[in-house]
Image (spheres, grey):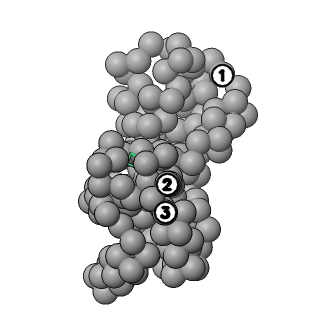
């Protein structure tokens, strides 16, 4: 069991253990679903199938209900995010200052839609509702980096920069 290569279920077992750790501080109340999903999303960059099953069991919910919540919120994904996750803020302050144009530019440049990851796994694209930097609107983020006072030109430059890395 110590050698990952000799244990075909090791990855799954590891995820199960990690999910159990994540869920430990939470009671098995359905209301904790979003919080747990948030933590899982941050840890893995997506919600693995094994995690969905473990969470559904723990909260005594049908798997379909957990799946429904994951697909309802754009911040949760069923596939791994790219090395660089580009997130465009569509909160009110950013939206009125043109963040929709920035989103469209990012889609065109990356050749993907919201919620998708590029074939090379380098970029994924999603949207968010306010990252708490409204004074810098419009805003987009790449992983934990916040880019304020954004323009179509700026997203071009930033995506070019990450493309070269
Ligand atoms: S609305 Fe975009 S940071 Fe607040």
Q: Where is residue 106 in the image (x, y as percent from the top left)?
A: 50, 73
Q: Tell me if I can see residue 9 in this picture.
A: no
Instruction: Residue under label 2, please give it.
Output: 96
Residue 117, above or below 36: below
Q: What element carries label 2?
A: helix
- Residue at image mark 3: 98
Q: Does the beta carbon at disc 2 come under 8 Å from ligand 1?
A: no
Residue to which mark 1 is pinned: 61
Q: In this view, does 55 lie to the left or right of 26?
A: right
Q: In this view, does 61 lie above or below 8?
A: above
Q: In this view, does 119 lie to the left or right of 159?
A: right
Is 163 situated left or right of 53 in this image?
A: left
Query: Mark 1–mark 2 contact, CB under 8 Å?
Result: no
Residue 16 spot, x, y in % from top left: 46, 36
The residue depicted at 72 percent of the width and 34 percent of the height is: 64
Residue drawn at (49%, 46%) of the image: 92
Q: Is 158 in front, or is 63?
A: 158
Q: Distance between the residues labelled 1 and 2?
A: 39 Å
The residue closer to the viewer here, 21 or 90, is 90
Q: Earlier in the sequence, mark 3 or mark 1?
A: 1
Q: Ligand 1 closer than 8 Å to the CB at disc 1?
A: no
| Nearer to me, 158 or 57 | 158
Q: Position of residue 95 (x, y in %)?
A: 50, 54
Q: Residue at x 40, y 37 (%)?
A: 39
**x then y, percent, for residue 154:** 35, 76
Q: What element carries label 1?
A: loop
**Number of residues whose C-alpha sits closer than 10 Å to that of mark 3, classed few (under 14), some (14–19) or many (20 or more):** some
> How far is disc 2 from disc 3 in space, using C-alphas?
6 Å
Q: Residue at x 37, y 30 (%)?
A: 22
Q: Quadrant of residue 141?
A: bottom left
């Amino acid at each position: 069991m110590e050698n990952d290569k000799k244990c075909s279920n090791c990855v799954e077992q590891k995820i199960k253990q990690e999910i159990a750790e994540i869920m430990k501080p939470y009671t098995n109340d359905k209301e904790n679903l979003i919080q747990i999903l948030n933590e899982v999303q941050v840890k893995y960059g997506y919600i693995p199938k094994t995690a969905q099953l473990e969470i559904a069991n723990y909260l005594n919910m049908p798997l379909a209900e957990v799946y429904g919540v994951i697909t309802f919120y754009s911040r949760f994904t069923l596939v791994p995010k790219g090395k660089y996750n580009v997130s465009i803020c569509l909160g009110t302050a950013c939206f009125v200052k043109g963040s929709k144009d920035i989103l469209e530019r990012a889609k065109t440049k990356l050749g993907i839609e919201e919620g998708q990851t590029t074939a090379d796994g380098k970029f994924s694209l999603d949207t968010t509702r306010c990252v708490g930097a409204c004074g810098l609107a419009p805003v987009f983020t790449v992983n934990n980096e916040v880019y304020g006072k954004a323009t179509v030109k700026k997203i071009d430059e930033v995506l070019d920069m990450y493309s070269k890395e």
